[in-house]
């Protein structure tokens, strides 16, 4: 890979070599984990130590450097790596790794948790966009309103998440008592054991800040073109 990276026209091949090396590393980890778990309890698990993670990081950095050298993005590296990992997973070579074993043993629970997470995040994002886009467009011709909106949004950004959770629990508990339907929709609850855990409203409070600048900006600031050019 280092030899290929010395010439600019061979940089795409160097990026592909990094993806191949990553696939080989994953295959080695899977085979090693399978051999380590032979004849042991089904509850045993094997996971990579620090060395493989460092190797993955170095390969990713090398692929990113190759992509930057040719003036592109590391999409080729990501695509080839994803295809290689999918092929290893389909062939059963990664079955010894702890994450694969857990996914096989608790697949239904993981899928349910993933669906709940997507519903929670998607609902919060939808509400944040519903608030941010109209207010951002309204602030286009009102600089004072834009300043107020950004101050409020940035204020929510600097509050730690756990503190924001605590601040919202009381008001949302009262809101849930007044409107029980909100509890069924998940706007004031995220689980049966946490009847008023305000995770979705908390996410909604944090997301308007990244959405507003794109809607309320009347033009690029003087430093934006320079930052974009690097």
Image (cartoon, helix red, strand yellow):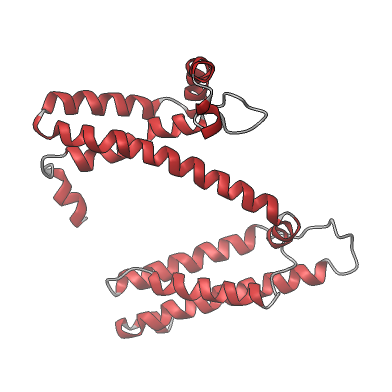
Q: Is residue 116 left or right of residue 215?
A: right
Residue 169: x %, y % from top left:
52, 19
Is 46 in front, or is 91? 91
Residue at x 17% of width, y 25% of height: 145
Would you place residue 102 above or below residue 215 in this image? Answer: below
Residue 210: x %, y % from top left:
31, 39
Residue at x 55% of width, y 65% of height: 56
Would you place residue 27 above or below residue 132 in this image? Answer: below
Tell me if I can see residue 38 in this picture: yes
Q: Is residue 76 left or right of residue 93?
A: left
Q: Is residue 123 left or right of residue 35?
A: left
Is 7 in front, or is 130? 130
Tell me if I can see residue 1 in this picture: no
Residue 91: x %, y % from top left:
67, 78
Would you place residue 108 above or below residue 202 in this image? Answer: below
Residue 72: x %, y % from top left:
30, 71
Is 85 in front, or is 5? 85
Quarter of the image containing the C terminus?
A: bottom left
Is 77 in front, or is 166? 166
Res 38 → quadrant = bottom right
> How many callouts does the rendering have?
0
Residue at x 15% of width, y 51% of height: 226
């Amino acid at each position: 890979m280092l030899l290929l990276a010395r010439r600019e026209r061979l940089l795409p091949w160097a990026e592909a070599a990094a993806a191949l090396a990553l696939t080989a590393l994953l295959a080695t980890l899977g085979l090693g984990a399978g051999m380590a778990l032979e004849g042991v309890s089904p509850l045993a698990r094997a996971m990579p130590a620090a060395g493989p993670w460092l190797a993955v990081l170095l390969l990713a950095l090398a692929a990113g450097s190759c992509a930057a050298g040719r003036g592109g993005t590391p999409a080729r590296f990501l695509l080839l790596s994803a295809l290689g990992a999918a092929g290893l997973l389909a062939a059963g070579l990664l079955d010894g790794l702890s994450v694969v074993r857990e996914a096989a043993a608790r697949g239904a629970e993981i899928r349910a948790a993933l669906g709940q997470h997507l519903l929670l995040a998607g609902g919060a994002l939808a509400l944040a966009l519903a608030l941010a886009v109209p207010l951002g467009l309204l602030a286009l011709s009102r600089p004072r309103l834009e300043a107020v909106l950004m101050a409020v949004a940035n204020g929510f950004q600097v509050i730690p998440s756990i503190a924001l959770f605590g601040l919202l629990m009381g008001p949302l508990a009262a809101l849930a008592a007044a409107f029980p339907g909100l509890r069924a929709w998940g706007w004031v609850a995220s689980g049966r054991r946490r009847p008023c855990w305000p995770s979705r409203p908390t996410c909604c409070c944090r997301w308007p800040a990244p959405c507003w600048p794109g809607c309320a900006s009347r033009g690029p600031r003087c430093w934006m073109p320079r930052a974009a050019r690097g």
